[in-house]
Amino acid sequence: MKIKKGDTVKVLYGKDSSKSGKVLSVNPRKRMVLVEGLNMFKKHIKGDGQTKKSEIVDVTRPMPASKVTVICSHCGKPTRVGMKLEGKNYVRVCKKCGKGLDVKVEKKVEAKKVETKTKKVTKKSK
C-alpha cells in the first residue's frame, strides 16, 4: 500500500466524500485505513445499572484504502503516489509536482541566549 500512517488523505466517495483527515492506522492485509474524524458511527453501550452507565458513543471505523487519495504536502492537491528509486531505497513521489512525500520538513530551532550576570566578590584583608 502506498498510504502510510500520518498522511493527510481526502475521501473520494461515500458519505464523507470531499472531506480530509489524518491517517491514524493502516491495515495492509485488509487494505483498510482509519482516518481521524471520518467514517463515524454510533455505538450503543449497555450499562450494568450500578457502575457503568448506558451511553451512545461515536466510533471511528476503518474504510477501504481505495476510497481515499493522498494529499501532497508540497502542492496541497490530491494526487496519486508514484515510487522513485533514490540510491538503494524507494521514495514515494507526488505525481503532480514530482516532489517526495516522505521528506521531513526541518524545523528551525533558535538557540536562546542565556545571559548570566557575574558578581565580583572581594575579600577584605585584616
Image (cartoon, helix red, strand yellow):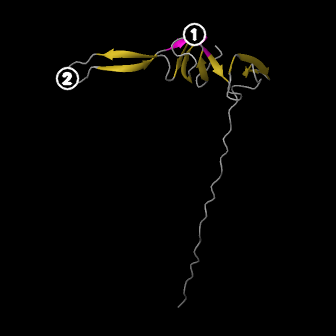
The dot on residue 73 is: none
Residue at 75% from the left image edge and 26% from the top image edge: 99
Say which residue label 1 marks: 31
Can you name the residue that lies furthest to the right here?
87
Q: Is residue 116 left or right of residue 103?
A: left
For residue 50, which numbered disc appears in the image? Answer: 2
Foreground of the two, 31 or 55: 55
Q: Which corner quadrant holds the N terminus?
A: top right
Helix, strand or loop at label 2? It is: loop
Residue depicted at x 68% and y 32% = 104
Kindly identify the amino acid type of the residue bearing the numbered disc 2.
Answer: Gln
Let me know if residue 64 is in the magenta part.
yes
**Residue 98 horizontal side relative to residue 41, left or right:** right
> What residue span does the magenta drawing correspond to?
62-68
Query: Residue 49, percent across and down?
Result: 20, 20
Task: Check disc 1: other Cα within 10 Å, few if <14, some if 14-19, many if 20+.
Answer: some
Question: In the figure, is residue 56 to the left or right of 110?
Answer: left
Q: Indicate the position of residue 70 as horizontal and vertical percent values.
A: 64, 20
Identify the secondary structure beneath mark 1: loop
Which quadrant would residue 113 be assigned to in this image? bottom right
Q: Residue at x 57, y 10 (%)?
A: 31
**Cα separation between marks 1 and 2:** 41 Å
Residue 107 horizontal/vertical position (percent) = 66, 41
Q: Is residue 24 above or below residue 123?
A: above
Image quadrant where residue 51 sits: top left
| Along the viewing direction, whichever of 31 and 124 lies nearer the viewer | 31
